[in-house]
Image (tube, coloured by chain):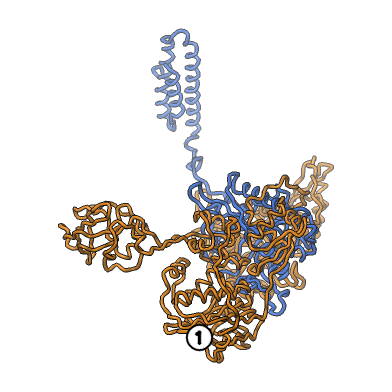
Chain colours: A orange, B blue
Amino acid sequence: MKISIDWLKDYIDTDLTVDQIEEKLTLTGLEVEGVGHIGSKLPGVLVGKVLTCEDHPNADRLKVCTVDIGSAEVSIICGAPNVAAGQTVPVATVGTTLPVTDKDGNHLTLRKAKIRGVYSHGMICAEDELGLSNDHSGIMVLDDNLKSGTPLSEVLSLYEDDVLEIGLTPNRPDAASHLGTARDLAAVENKTLKKPDVKIPDAGAEVGKRLSVEIRNPEKCHRYVAKIIENVTIAESPDWLKNRLKAIGLRPVTNVVDATNFVLHEMGQPLHAFDYDRVAGKKIVVQSYEQTTKFSTLDDVEREVPAGGLFICDGEKPVALAGIMGGGNSEIHEGTKNVLLESAYFEPVGIRKTSKALALQTDASYRFERGIDPNITLIAAERCAQIIADIAGGTIVDGYIDVHPVVTSPKELSLRISYLNKVLGTDFKIDEAVDILNRLEIEAAAKDSDAIGCVVPTFRPDIEREIDLVEEVARIFDYNKIPAPEFVRYIRPAPLPFTETFTNQVKTAARSLGFHEIFSNSLLPEKAAKFTENPKDIIPTLNPISKDQALLRPDLLYGFLRSVAWNFNRSAESVRFFEVGNTFRHSEKGTYIENVQEETHILLGLSGLKHVEHWRTEPGQYTFFDLKESLKGFVKLLGLSDYLIERQKDNTSLLYFLDEQQVGSLRKISDDFCNYFEIDAPAFAAEFSLTRLAEFLEKKSEDTYVEIPKFPPIDYDIAFVLDKSTSSGDLEQTIREAASDRLIGLRVFDVYEGESIGRGKKSIAYRLLFLDKSKTLTISDVEPIIQKITKLAAQRFSAKLRS
Amino acid sequence: MSNTDLNEIREEIEKFPISTSEGLEEYRLKYLSRNGIIPDLLSRIGDAPPEQRAMLGKELNQLKNLAQDKFKKAQQDLKSGASHKQKATDDITLQVEPQPIGSLHPITQVLDEIKSVFFRLGFTVASGPELEDDFHNFTALNFPPEHPARDMQDTFFIRKDENDTSNDRVLRTHTSPVQIRLMESQRPPIRAIMPGRVYRNEAITAKSYCLFHQVEALYVDTHVTFAELKETLIILAQMLYGEDVRYRLRPSFFPFTEPSLEMDVWWGNEHKGQWLEVLGAGMVDPNVFRAVDIDPEVYSGYALGLGIERMAMLRYGINDIRLFYDNDLRFLNQFL
């Protein structure tokens, strides 16, 4: 919202500078987001008389003029075709900065300059050079009666203004006008607000004979005031009005329309002017339709207004889209003689719905949807009628029509000073609070030693409760001036939740294993669904602005691959990424929300070159085992090594379990998925549910220190020959099962296949490490264990010892 | 014969390259032979002033030992062929492959910093779901039924019931629903921060992304005051932006706090700069307390929230929010 400083000063006497006003308003809650300067008084531009005008000795198109500028006669070079001796002209003297800018956007500052060998001491100006119009056809010629040396600002009505851009919060409809903004400034500065003087005539009278008004939907239109001004002359507005509107970025249209816009921005009441003679049946009906209605607004657009949208109709048809925009069929035009002026209160929600549905926001709808003052309707109508009569001629038809089915009365509230001080931590006296409230036109008076009775004006719909009054006092006092408390209590801190410390542990672990943390979008494109395991469990978004944000991620894989592709496409050779983030799936029960399983996952993934081409190493790509190795370290860092069970799912994926519940997986990512992202290198990812890991670990008792063994371990090598189809993981599991708890280490040191051990066979060699806490083990202690192992391995897998 | 000269000779000897028997002979002739530098120096001790002779003799002897040791070692090496065995790859100045190093995302780093400030102030952490119901995201936070945030334009809906908004499911638009969950599950005093991911149904551009991260802080107890909130904000600004931070508080509006404010910090120097909004805050609105059955006449509280991406962008001069989600290694490697 734009506020002109010059206009603002119509309602408050103040010596504050623009910067000070900006600061004051911002600190009361009307945040000034920017300040602009418009127009110029053109200091340094004077009236001059062209005494002589000779051809330039060295240039065909230039003239050398002698110009009387009052204090001196100066020589000025001029290139304009119309310059001539005897003219009275505007002269920009040396040192003057003009509104025109060069191609870099810098303002032109005049210097004494030599032009083709002749000095020029200033510039005779064209209108565009002074920022008065776009006319560059020749120099501006002034009235001959003007005296040389007179500042141009005294001759022309030059306009200059500063304009504030205010970011208005939705709770402050009252400040959506110059008067409303001035009210806050006056309250802070403790000045009087100078409201325009508006006299309200008697109701009805003559207007009632010329027009009838009916409101069929009083819940949507609480009040409708009509005035008629007859025998107006439609013309351009006077300069003062045009300047006001131009300052805040509005294009002047005609005097009548400009007057309505002026009052809107002055008082915050949107008004609409109809051509009275185009209102059929001399009748206004405010109503909505139950079906979609086509209507051409005055911007020449035919709009389909949804059912429920409110219209202003005449005796035959809709003539305006209530509170949003008038219709082409009834608008003011050049030949308009008689004006019907509407000032109404439309209920905010309905206006907002229609405005949203049509994607049509106007200065009027902006104010109605925030809630205007329901009791300014008549005052604004009178104010506007008077301005129209002043600037467009014509006479105001006696009286007014005021249909007012829903009356809003000022709210009465009570504010306890004890409550105010308790909330703010301050020591306000009752009189201080009363004073501040009164400055805001809240009628406040102490009822007793604690309570302040308050009557809240209807232009403040946001003040509904005691706490709202507390805010008013605090903001006008200035938040920054509220004193620091004498002490701040330090309450007993609650322990950090396990998930917090665990998540930190997880991230630190992943980082220590050489993975970069990534953050990826939780919203996936529709086409991502086909790459996930159970597409029917994926939760879609109902209304994504883009198809790329159609699904909630069921896991972290998509984001990982997208980041891999992004980097490979930008010359990266190798990636090691991890991400911690929430994932979403439909489920029977749900975590927080019914039927929604929202869990925090971690993904560890890698792809590309493990080794680049380098003198020490052959180039080589990451394999499944590289990630499995990292995962092993990760699991160890989380203290899960002794609990996590690995099971093979298929040739390219492993699953991990805790207490028989699946908690994660490790896999090579399918070629299809990689191809989708055009990733050539194999990619691998391990994904775990941190939610489930945390549940498990939280229950588990904390590990304690285990004494370092006093006796040395003994190792024993054993190799099995077995079918290739048997997984080594199963065999390893069997070995562990058969061995006693003396087995403290198990390492595969060789894997072999070849004709010598038979077709379809493989050999796996283990080095087993045994330890006893209470003695040094000998081979004879270990042999019985080995026998048990070989027996069980033979039973389960027909595994034979390799000799 | 100055010390400087002796040092120069010592350095020469140390650096003298000997890789062949010819080189060894050259070395011997230059330094150790009868006409070599060292015997020559020794012979001239007598020229020095008497009080310096003892010291000079000692130093020259050390030099002689050094030269002889080097000779012997080189002779040995040549005999055993050691220098021939020195491989090209034994050169320890050869460059190595980079070690893969891990990192935490800048959002995590900034969040950790914010957490550490709040932990010092005695706050704990709470979390909640990103997919929320209407009650927690809107109703309990005093959003009126017709609030624009409930429009389909601004918020990602997962379920929308035209007749009963309480059935609506959304991607949370702020972390404030966690306040509600916390107050539902726990009675005051409550002092916690709530970091997390929030969503806005917006096109992805340099300035906006469909999601971002917030931290929210909530403190509820008897006698929590606006002045205390202000004090906390100042501490926070000083810890995050430096002791000399210039700040201002200005009234603002949020449905769930009253009075509400925003805090700006001055970005720039004394002469040139601008106020930049860094957080929003306020006293918990009595309607919020009523929604979770806490008596607003007994308890009061404050809440504050700030955007993590915004803070990181300010801090590091990042001008495109998408950089946080592209995960470009050239970006991530700047935050090790």
Q: Nearer the viewer, residue A221 or A791?
A: A221
The residue tagged with tag 1: helix, strand or loop? helix
- Is residue B2 positioned above or below A486 on the image? above
Q: Position of residue A591 (x, y in %)?
A: 75, 67
| The image quarter in which residue A174 lies | bottom right
Q: Position of residue A775 (x, y in %)?
A: 83, 42
Output the chain of dot 1.
Answer: A
Dot 1 alpha-carbon crowd within 10 angstroms: few under 14, some 14 to 19, many 20 or more: many
> In the image, A504: left or right of B12?
right
Which amino acid, mark 1? Tyr
Q: Nearer the viewer, residue A286 or B130?
A: A286
Q: Position of residue B90 (x, y in %)?
A: 51, 40
> In the image, A336: left or right of A676?
left
> In the image, A442: left or right of B37?
right
- Is residue A421 positioned above or below A559 on the image? above
- Is residue A328 positioned above or below A510 on the image? below
Residue at the right extreme, as displayed: A774
User: Is any part of residue A699 visible from this angle?
Assistant: yes
| The image quarter in which residue A559 lies | bottom right
- Tell me what residue is drawn at x 33 percent, y 65 percent: A128
The residue that mark 1 highlights is A276
Q: How many marks?
A: 1
User: Is any part of residue A635 visible from this angle?
Assistant: no
Quarter of the picture containing the N terminus of chain B is top left
Residue at the top extreme, as displayed: B50
Q: Nearer the viewer, residue A685 or A763?
A: A685
Q: Position of residue B71 (x, y in %)?
A: 47, 25
